Image (cartoon, rainbow, N blue to C red):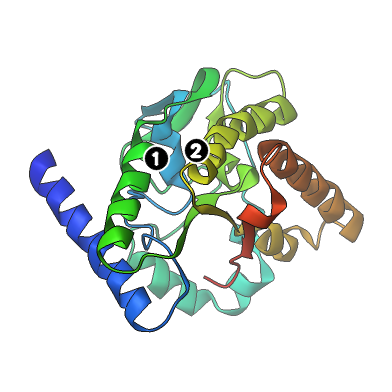
Amino acid sequence: MDETAFEACLTGAVENVVKRQADVGIDIVSDGEFGKSISWANYIHPRMRGIEFRQGGPPANARLAPLHFINSKDRKDFRDFYTEYESQFGIAGMSKNFSPTQMGFPVVTGPISYSPEQIRSDLARLKAAMAKTSGGRGFMPVVVPVSAAIGVADAHYRDHESFLYAIADALHDEYQAIVDAGFDVQIDDAYIASEYDGMIPPGTLDDFRRWADAGVAALNHALRGIPEERVRYHICWGS
């Protein structure tokens, strides 16, 4: 890929989407998530040290967070729709070893930490676009820890909680960078709702609540020290 051409294309796309938001009267604009290659959730994995991308699926010794939603009632009731929809994105026939990235399977091979280079570029791009078109306030959408953990094979941490909190620590750095740049941070949480549809049955409401409580605790850990008024929380089930 021609990096110079890509950067010019991305800069123009962000300027255009910010202008469109301002033109229709949106008060707090975003970059349209154009800076997130791969997907709304998996964009974060290349920004983390300690995660490698390997072809051929996860290692045998790795722990994989379960994808309950692939067996959900919604998917069974509307199987034809999901088959058609997912085929458009090359992810038909999803399994518990599914990962949507074409870069390979994300595997945790060492301590997770955050690399801030890409978020700095995202923030500078949005700030420049707003200066040209909208002014006012802006926000940046980001992934919630539990969603960032799904689809990642952990071959390093002793248990899932340690792995989840390592991701939360890394995401804290991204959240903080966004707020420090003068933007609000929007937490995008797709699985907090959709996992219910996949866990029950055979699980119980108490099972779901324990899982959800653990995810909320990890998110609160990632948000530590960030003013509540600078945070938006978005449940995006249904996408």
The x and y percentages for residue 95 are 52, 50
Q: Which mark is residue 18?
A: none
- The relative height of residue 48 versus residue 198 in the rendered view (above or below) is above
Is tag 1's residue or tag 2's residue first in the polypeptide sequence?
Answer: 1
Q: Mark on residue 119?
A: 1
Residue 177, numbered label:
2
- Residue 3: x %, y % from top left: 13, 40
Residue 75 position (above or below residue 227): below
Whether residue 61 is visible, yes or no, is yes
Taking the image as shown, residue 178 lies to the left or right of residue 46, namely right
Q: State the residue in front, 210 or 131.
A: 131
Q: Secondary structure at mark 2?
A: helix
Q: Residue at x 62, y 60 (%)?
A: 232
The relative height of residue 178 versus residue 17 in the rendered view (above or below) is above
Q: In which quarter of the view is residue 2 placed? A: top left
- Residue lying furthest right in this view? 206
**Residue 239 placement, left or right of 211:** left
Would you say the residues marked 1 and 2 are in contact, meaning their CB atoms lie under 8 Å apart? yes
Name the amino acid, label 1. Ile
